[in-house]
Each structure stands twice: as C-alpha cells, then as structure tokens.
Amino acid sequence: MKYTKHILKFGALLTAFSMLLSGCALKEPSDDVLKKTEFASDDDKADVTLVLADLNSYDTIVGMIDLKFKEEVEERSGGKIRIDIQPNGVLGSETDVLDTMIGGGGTIDMAMEYRFYKGFIGIINIVFTISVLFMTIRLFADANIFFRIIMILLSILFPVIQPAAIYGKCVKQLEMLPKDLELVFNDSGVPVICEGKKEKIPWKNISNAIKQKNMIIIFSGEKHGYMISDRELGEKKEEFFKFICRKINKYGNTDK
C-alpha cells in the first residue's frame, strides 16, 4: 500500500509535467503561419503596423503566444491593425529594446520580455525540479530500473537537458547566419558584400539609425537592418554614428 501511494504521487507529478510541456494547450505554429508571419507584404492594407519585439523564437511557448496575439488582433480589427513580430532578439537585447521604447525611437511599439528562466515559468521549473529530486530520493531505492531512469531524466531535465537543447539550437542558428559579411559606408551608399555577392544600398533606403549602449542599429527598411556592435566600432562609435546621421537626415529622421 505504501509503495502504491508513492507511485500515485509520482504519477501525479508526471501528469503535472505533461501539462507543463503542453504549453497551456497552445499549438505549435504551422509552416504556413510562420511563412505568412515572416514574409508579410509591405503592401498590406493595414492602417496601422505595430512592431512587437521578442527575445524568443516562434517554437517556444512565448513565441506561440506572440502568434496568437497577432492572429487575434488582426482578425478582430478586420485587418486594419497588423502586428509585425520580430523574434529571436533581432532588434537587440532586453535592455536595448526597452531603451528604444522609453527613448521614443519609434521603431518598436511593443515588447515581450518573458523568458523561460525569468518569471512564472522559471518558478515552475524550479519547483518541478526540487519536487522530482525529493521524490527521487524517497523512491529510488525501492523503484525498478524503468522508474529509476525516468526519475533521473526528470531530475536533470531543466538543469541540464533544456539548457543543452537551447545551446544546440543557438549553434544551429549561428550556422545559418551568412558568413563573411562586409559592410562599407561611403558617400554614395552602403555596399554589402556577403559570400561573394555584392549589393549596394543607397542612402535613400536607409530609414533610421539608433545608437544603443552596446551597438548601433541601422535600418534598411521596416523589417530589415544591421546591428554593429561596439566591438566592431571601437573608439570610432561616436564618429561613425554622426557620419550616418549626416547621410540619412535628408531622407528621414534619426533617433538616438
């Protein structure tokens, strides 16, 4: 009877774990949804386009919330409001995004600053791991080999397996980034050289530039741009930003 009671407790723990992984019944976005989101036309008939910055990718719980929010807003507004989601931290870190919004840069309207190890989900992960460790200590000696393996896997899920999976995903994303990207800023525009291909962006297509604490973001459109870190700019950061401002002021506004 005592052993059965422990098994029921462990089963309840597994049930809670499955509910946690279900992401509150949010469905993983389909390829069609992602394609529509990532390649939304600039010619949409929306009266207002709001940029939503997020540090997470679409396949996370928070990313799915972003997509659901976008779907609801666009549906209920009859297409008059379009949500332009910028995932994976493409608009900068949490501090950069907040600085841009507070400073009135005008390029970011909303931000989702909710991450797995910060906030409610992080607390759930900690509580779950502590509970599993406690149950493992209590039941490990009397459990068979199958339950021992399950308990060990659950014990290292959030402290070891999940961070390793995130690291692997980051490595994969880095491999997909273009190699040997070279930007040249001169009087006639911005020549871009990438993997042997060359393209020149005229200054009239540079819509904005924002100076952040650790980088300068240069926008070549509503959804495209380049982030140049302080590591690349060095002591010439101020001089470079002033140069960019002089070149694009005649075509649009520049926000610091």
Image: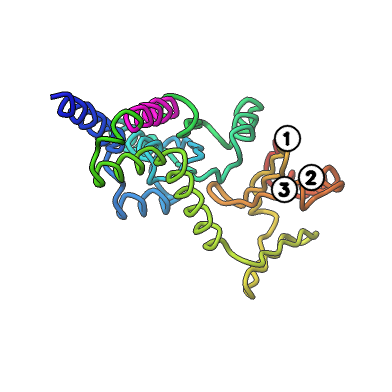
Q: Quadrant of the N terminus?
A: top left
Say which amino acid is labelled 1: Lys
**Which residue appears farthest toward the front when viewing the image?**
141
Q: Is residue 133 above or below residue 149?
A: above
- 2 and 3 marks in contact (CB < 8 Å): no
Given residues 252 and 69, the one toward you in this image is 69
Q: Is residue 4 left or right of residue 78?
A: left
Q: Position of residue 29 (x, y in %)?
A: 31, 47
**Segment colored magenta:** 122-136
Label 1: which secondary element = loop
Q: Are marks 2 and 1 in contact (CB under 8 Å)?
A: yes
Disc 3 crowd rating (10 Å Cα; few below 14, some 14-19, many 20+) is some
Viewer-proximal residue among 233 and 184: 233
Closer to viewer: mark 1 or mark 3: 3
Disc 3 on helix, strand or loop? strand
**Looking at numbered disc 2 in the image, what kind of residue is underneath it?**
Phe
Q: Sequence order check: which comes first, mark 1 or mark 3?
A: 3
Based on the picture, tell me whether residue 25 belongs to the magenta stretch: no
Q: Amino acid at mark 3?
A: Ser
Q: Residues within 10 Å of mark 1 (few under 14, many from 20)?
A: some
| Mark 2 or mark 1: whose residue is earlier in sequence | 2
Residue labelled with disc 3: 229
Task: Identify the residue at horizontal 27%, vertical 37% (top origin).
Answer: 22
For mark 2, what is the residue? 241
Q: How many marks on residues?
A: 3
Q: Position of residue 80 (x, y in %)?
A: 36, 35
